[in-house]
Image (cartoon, rainbow, N blue to C red):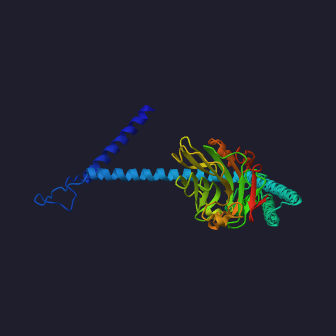
Amino acid sequence: MFRWRLPQAVCVLSACVCLLLAYEDDIEVNYADPFYNEITEGQTPEPTPSSTPCSSPDLTKWDKLFSMLENSQMRENMMLQYANDIIKVEMGSLRGEMLRFIAQYGGSCGVAVESAGRRMALQLEGRLRETVDRFKIKDQISASAGNSVGNSGHLEGMLQQLLSAARSQASQLAKLEISCFSSPGAGTGMNSKTGSPFTEGTAGLREQEVTSRDVTLDTVLAALQQTRVEQEELLRSSRQRYLPGGCEMALLFPMRSRRIYTSVLPEVPLSVSAFTVCMWVKPTTVSNKTVLLSYGNRRNPYEIQLLLAQTSALFTIGGEAHLVEARGVVNTGSASEWIHLCGAWSSKQGLASLWVGGKKVASVPGVAEGHVLPDGGSMQLGQERNGCCPIAQNIGMPGFEAGFDHKLAFTGKITGVNMWDRVLSEEEIPQLATRGGQGCEQRGNVVAWGVTEMVPHGGAQFIN
């Protein structure tokens, strides 16, 4: 079998060699360049430079600076946007918390405020009723004693008006309280829709409710201020009617006249070297010289003088040459108010002082130093004895009426006239000047109000 296949292989190999030789004759190898746009050596162009790809140009320092600024501006904008977003979220959360707080506590706080206001109005009404009852009792007592001065109808009418005003304020406070209770969510801490978020419309509605409550409270405040003004007017009216310092009576000088005065007849001799004289006065009008108290004899009618002159208070000892004056201490615009006056003097140092309303308003040394008041003179309230007239005109005229001048006469009321033979201390005089105190009970040892004899002349009279 091997012998058979060997000749076959030789045949196949020879056939292949023949074929190879046949193709080799047909193939021509051409080693020339196959270009048709040939360029000669004289036309060879110079190579053009080309930029290197991905190469960055050289930047100047200004370009770098601008680039840094742009980057910084971008970062700043990013930070601002981030902060703005945070603030929006926080403000939204805070707004929600505030709305929930208002819904929970706003109504209860409003109700508490209005309840307090209502209690205040009720207390005011109760006090006013007590005042009315007290004034009625005092008027009944005065009427039964037969010493009532004036008519209390005007005062009672003012009190009734004040009482009606207080009732009106109580009614307004009650309406305000009802409106607070009827508002949605008031005092309950719950919204009308549980779990629903607060919308802009709900917030606007609550702002309107708060505004309406503020307006109502402003109205109540204005009404209470008006009530306070009426109370002050009532107090002034009460002060005009009732006497100060616990005094129970006063001397009335109805008009200016040389015949209207009051003689004071002390039981103790006035030969003293120190004294203090005090009194309450309520002048109807004040002239350039209005005499409150005077003491003197025929030799010197001006030993003691306590005077008013427009807005000034004057005090003289031993004659008009020894004068103590305090200007601007009397308010002539309030002639219906009671004024407390005191004059003190000591001959040891000649120190004289003048007190108005419990305050020392003037102090002068060397006033009539070493002087002693003479005994046997006459003391008057509301006039001075000037000794101007001949003796023949004084015959049959007790009290020396012919020596009086109506231009100097006092018109108004005087009470609490007291005189001591010493200089009162700076603690004692303010106590006497306390309007609501009991100054009239601290009576002097020379002249004592309610004890020493005082004789009214002309139209002067005691009232209470």
Looking at the rendered structure, the number of numbered marks drawn on it comes to: 0
Outermost residue, front side:
392
Q: Determine if residue 143 is in view.
A: yes
In the rendered image, the vertical position of residue 346 relative to residue 85, given as above or below: above
Residue lying at 39% horizontally and 35% vertically, measured from the top left:
6
The residue lying at 83 percent from left, 61 percent from top is 148
Residue 241 place in picture, x, y as percent: 76, 60
Of residue 89 and residue 216, the one placed in the foreground of this image is 216
Which quarter of the picture shows residue 272? Answer: top right
Residue 323 position, x and y percent, is: 54, 53
Residue 206 locus on image (x, y percent): 70, 60
Q: Tell me if I can see residue 284 in this picture.
A: no
Q: Residue furthest top?
A: 2
Q: Provide residue 181's location: percent of width, then percent of height.
A: 80, 58
Where, by quadrant of the figure, is residue 461 drawn? bottom right
Query: What quarter of the picture does the N terminus occupy?
Result: top left
Compared to residue 273, the image places residue 125 above or below, namely below
Q: Is residue 460 above or below residue 110?
A: below
Could you tell me which residue is drawn at 32 percent across and 53 percent down? 66
Query: Of 41 and 131, which appears nearest the observer?
Result: 131
The outermost residue toward the left is 42
Q: Quadrant of the C terminus?
A: bottom right
